[in-house]
Image (tube, helix red, strand yellow):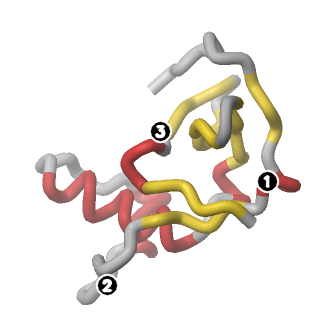
Amino acid sequence: MVKVPFHLIRVNTSEGSLEIIFPYGNKWWKLDWDKVPDRFKHLYVVYLKLQGIEIPDHLKEYQVNTLSMDNIDISIDLDKCVQVPENYPLGV
């Protein structure tokens, strides 16, 4: 498990599926949306709300009344991730 600051993680669409893209070490990684930790999804909903963006149906279950913001690092299992090149296309 590695810790990645929330602000370094990008949501992406690839071949019609959601994923996240993030740097760790000197490499870039992607992780399928269904394997993304709930903590990221909760923070992502807050991020969208703060921008005034309507919450998509697939994220509505991650809306919470209270969310601790003392640490916004996301624990990600690199064994579930795939390394991608720096120029990996971003679709969102």
Alpha-carbon distance for marks 1 and 2?
Answer: 24 Å
The answer to whether 41 appears left or right of 55 in the picture is right
Q: How many marks?
A: 3
Q: Residue furthest right?
A: 79
Q: Say which of 49 and 54 sits in front.
A: 49
The amino acid on which the numbered mark 1 sits, given as a three-letter code, is Leu
From the top left corner, tell me how far across and down residue 12 is, in percent: 53, 33
Residue 79 appears in which quarter of the rendering?
A: bottom right
Residue 50 disc label: none
| Residue plotted at (76% across, 61% down) | 77
Q: Say which of 79 and 56 sits in front.
A: 79
At mark 2, the secondary structure is loop
At mark 1, the secondary structure is helix
Q: Say which of 76 and 92 sits in front.
A: 76
Residue 78 disc label: 1
Alpha-carbon distance for marks 3 and 2?
Answer: 21 Å
The answer to whether 85 appears left or right of 86 in the picture is right
Alpha-carbon distance for marks 1 and 3?
Answer: 16 Å
Precedes in sequence: disc 3 or disc 2: 3
> Label 3 belongs to which residue?
10
From the top left corner, tell me how far across and down residue 48 is, in percent: 26, 52
Residue 68 disc label: 2
